[in-house]
Image (spheres, grey):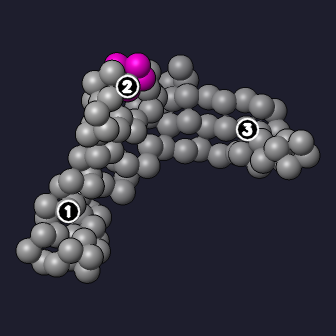
Amino acid sequence: MAAAEQLVADLTGSYQELWPVILADEYKQTWLDNCKELVGKENAQAAFDKLSSMVSGEIYGEEAVKAYADGKGVYECHFTQQVAKLEFDGDDSVIKGYVANSNII
């Protein structure tokens, strides 16, 4: 229990969505270089396209469960409710969500 309480207290700071950051154009060449190492130059672009598409779905929740029951779907890995950034204050157990214009929601 003490470890869990410490984890919550340590969860402090601002967080933005992972995938829009690491899939940004500025990192595409890094992805392609790494894909080339794994699947060869001729398949690097296709591997990147497949990997990036797997985390850029448009639906989530029960709708996604039904649509992708066959296991061939993609994941919607974005924050919901138009949240652009989350801010945690573990000491006070406060979580705030911000939309793109920095207003708290």
Q: Which residue is drawn at 32% across and 29% down?
A: 69
Q: Which of 52 and 85 is in front in this view?
A: 52
Label 2: state its secondary structure.
Answer: helix
Q: Residues within 10 Å of mark 1 (few under 14, many from 20)?
A: some
Is 61 situated above or below 32? above
User: What residue span does the magenta drawing correspond to?
Assistant: 60-64
Q: Nearer the viewer, residue 40 or 18?
A: 40
- Residue ID for mark 2: 65
Q: Gap between marks 3 and 2, in whole Å?
A: 32 Å
Q: In the rendered structure, find residue 63 and report the number of the disc placed on it.
A: none
Percent position (x, y) of residue 82?
A: 40, 25
Q: In the rendered structure, find residue 47 and report the number of the disc placed on it.
A: 1
Q: Examine the residues drawn in magenta and state their main secondary structure.
A: helix
Position of 31 with respect to 102 (left or right) is: left
Counting residues from the start of the chain, the first of labels 2 and 1 encountered is 1
Q: Which of 12 and 104 is in front in this view?
A: 12
- Residue ID for mark 3: 89
Label 3: state its secondary structure.
Answer: strand
Q: Residue at x 16, y 69 (%)?
A: 44
Is residue 61 inside the magenta stretch? Answer: yes
Which-is-in-front pick, marks 3 and 2?
2
Label 1: state its secondary structure.
Answer: helix
